[in-house]
Amino acid sequence: MNSPILRMENIVKTFPGVVANRGVNLEIRRGEIHALLGENGAGKTVLMSILYGLYVPDSGTIYLNGQPITIKSPKDAIAKRIGMVHQHFMLEPTLTVAENIILGQFPSWTILNKQRIGEVHEKIRSLSNQFGLGVDPAARVSRLSVGEQQRVEILKVLYHGADLLILDEPTAVLTPQEASRLLEFLRDLAKKGLTTIFITHKLDEVMQVSDRVTVLRDGQVIGTCETRETNPRALAKMMVGREVLMDLHRKLASPGEPVLAISNLRVRDARGLPVVKGVSFTVRAGEIVGVAGVSGNGQSELALAIAGLIDDVAFDRFQLEGKDVTRRDLRAASHRHSAHIPEDRQKMGMVLPFSVSENFILEEYSSPRFARHGFLRGQAIRSYSQNQVKKFDIKVSDVSEEIANLSGGNQQKVVVARELDRHPGFLLVNQPTRGIDIGATEFVHQQILAQRDGGTGILLISTDLEEIFALSDRILVIFEGEIIGELPSDRSQVEKVGLMMAGKRDPDRE
Amino acid sequence: MRAVTEISNNHEFSMRIRKVLQGTLMPFIAILIALAIGAVILIAANFNPLQAYQAMYLGAFADFSSFTEVLLDATPLICIGVGLAVAFRCGIWNIGGEGQFYAGAVTGTAIALYAPALPGWILLPLVLVGGAAGGALWAMLAGYLKTRFGANEVVTTVMLNYVAIIATSYLVSGPMIEPRGTYPQTAQIPDGARLPLIMPPTRLNLGFIIALLLAVGLYLLIFKSSTGYAIRAVGINPEAAHYAGIQVKKNILLAMAISGGAAGLGGAMQIAGVTYRLFQQISPGFGFTAIAVSLLVNNNPLGIILAGILFGGLSTGARLMQMNAGVPAVLVNVIQGLVILSVVAFGAYRILTMEREE
Ligand SMILES: Nc1ncnc2c1ncn2[C@@H]1O[C@H](COP(=O)(O)OP(=O)(O)OP(=O)(O)O)[C@@H](O)[C@H]1O
Ligand SMILES: [Mg+2]
């Protein structure tokens, strides 16, 4: 019964200056959930992209159901019932959910009349209900949060039918509740015979859901093992090649003056509906305030509003480093007094065709460090970038390489490195370790704590409760655009925060 | 960092080759295809294509003096082309090079004719700067409509072309007409406003050198200056640029101003260096050919120097083809149009496939 559905043999894939896969052997059994683990840049995404027809391997063979096959394009892959949800979403933002899902499905001469669209909507709605994905087929993708977009991507694969489902870091953007719902759902799918390859950086998820796990390092398979015969510590060591600190040592905070004080902040979305409904809070120098919440509860808008990037915003008071800021100069003041790690790195955090070093100077390109007499100081920029690359252990052949060629986690490290280096009075951090491996997460967390200890006031928005509790000094819970409670950051509160995130305002009362 | 150090030379080499082929060879293949189609048309119209193309080639490159004519034709193409490159790099489809060229020609002529008698070393620079300012303002009009009201720049710049061309016709047949003249043209500009010849007896003048300097200057601006960095960032990912504190609208206006300024300078130099007066069809479509010139070399100002000379050669040669092989002007225009069309098509193809590779 456990005949392999898929075998990849000796897969080699090189890019100019980089060997991404150096002879990978991978066997996937029918109906199993197979976790793929590995550091940033280990070659996981490239390997799966080969399977999905996005790259052609330099050498190696793929066997599907025992037959050698070649997969030339994603269309090919879909025809062979292989589906993939990418690390970076590939949805067209101007289209609706339904339009995205059927993109390319019908021959171009098909007329999409009301009835046909209606059928599509109906099918999507029933799939969505069946799996509890809560996706509205008529919603425009640009209006969806990252978490919601994720669900659309999964739905898209299910809609087209698949025997083999590839998920590239699907839980990176989900809350623990959402994530465990997804994992349960994967279990269900496995029972129905679906095979899943599941890339993640979260070891507890591997333990919880997978049947077997393969660890990649430097483009090579370090080993495959039965999940029940291993443990997180062993996996971490396999991945990184050394022991990883699973717990951070955090000094007690000594908060100073407020660096950010907001009262009654209101934001409306493009349709004019309130998404942030009168939020008030203060962040002091030298403390980390965590905002916990299920994605889609107004965090994105809250972050954008603080960055001065949303037009439809109102507040009674907005103070940055003790100075009142008006609606008009919010953008400029925010840029002057604060640094931001954006939620969506590719959209907001970097310029994809630019090189790594060009991306390092995105904020400070005209500062005397990087420009003199209006000209960029090429040599200074280069050596600065090389230092940053070394300090953050960013995997890249040269800083002149296009950032688009970096693995997801390494792209994130570039953004984090850039923003932390601005040494702002106030730091807004939205999902800072999204897609970063455990070794690098440990490092980024240490860096954020070091900023705090250096006197920066930090607002940390994260859907990852682990992260919230690991870093925050106080926790605000956001639900449907309101802050419904403030709690001390104490592990004993985990359950309570979880309940509040689900909308229970007074979990103690029950 | 371990896997990274291992370089697979072979692969890299073949990738490089492919890039170079795509970058430079493809556009020239585009030109060859256009000329081949042109040959079919010539045959259909009972001309010997070999003879015609030979006349074209000799017209442009037979001897040094005909080559100076090529450079003369290349000058406005380079000026407008490098300007367009700045706009294109900023993500703005400025199709208005033609109108901006006219705006510069009109302003330059007006200064040359109506400024009080000034010594040449003041008058000439004034004419050139004035021409650049005229073109810049004309382009910024479209930039303003875009940043203020979100008006699509393709539409506005094309419409402003018509406005500029028609306004010029009106000016030279009315307000600015040569005193006691009958033709719709202005009087000749004074000697002090003319660009000095650099290789008499050929018509080649200082304008060509200025165009070269402009190209080098804008190359440095785009790729080496912090202003150019911001312009490129806005052109590629305005959202991230905005997020990083770069002023998107300001940069769009700036790019348009530079773009129009370069075209306007080209217009003023055409008056000050070649025609010495303004008349109705002062440009045979330089502004449109310049789009192809810039796209041909992926909006790189240094490449535009070569592409400008190439297209200058095409149009000079085409004139000679008309004179020496007796090919009617319409057919010559068709062939030139084919070349531009295929280059633009290849440029668009390249942009589209690049986006798909993301
Ligand atoms: N298109 C490309 N061009 C050049 N190099 C590439 C390209 N795609 C990936 N690489 C390189 O291949 C290596 C493996 O990348 P890959 O995206 O598979 O990593 P990953 O294991 O998915 O990492 P992460 O956990 O950060 O997502 C990286 O060093 C990356 O820089
Ligand atoms: Mg990846």
Image (spheres, coloured by chain):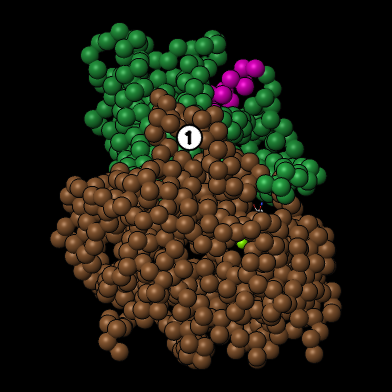
Chain colours: A brown, B green
Q: Is residue A123 left or right of residue B101?
A: right
Residue A295: give x, y in percent of width and height.
40, 72
Classify mark 1 as within 8 Å of ligand 1 or not, answering yes or no.
no
Q: Amino acid at mark 1?
A: Ile
- From the image, give the main secondary structure of the stretch colored magenta: helix
Location of residue B135 (image quadrant) = top left
Q: Residue at x 72, y 32 (%)?
A: B54
Q: Residue at x 31, y 83 (%)?
A: A507
Quadrant that contains the N terminus of chain A? bottom right
Q: Residue at x 47, y 57 (%)?
A: A249
Q: Compared with residue B44, is residue A114 higher up or lower down, i.e. above or below?
A: below
Q: Secondary structure at mark 1?
A: helix
Residue that label 1 marks? B222
Q: Is residue A183 left or right of residue B41?
A: left
Residue A487 appears in view = yes
Q: Residues within 10 Å of mark 1 (few under 14, many from 20)?
A: many
Query: Is B69 included in the stretch rendered in magenta?
Result: yes
Location of residue A45 (image quadrant) = bottom right
Q: Residue furthest left?
A: A316
Residue A101: give x, y in percent of width and height.
53, 78
Residue B275 appears in view = no
Residue B154: give x, y in percent of width and height.
40, 51
Residue B311: give x, y in percent of width and height.
59, 34
Q: Compared with residue A150, is residue A31 higher up or lower down, i.e. above or below?
A: below
Q: Quadrant of ligand 2?
A: bottom right
Identify the chain of the residue marked 1, using the numbered disc in the image. B
| Residue bounds of the magenta highlight | B64-79
Q: Residue at x 28, y 81 (%)?
A: A505
Q: Compared with residue B125, is residue A63 higher up or lower down, i.e. above or below?
A: below
Q: Compared with residue A372, is residue A86 higher up or lower down, i.e. above or below?
A: below
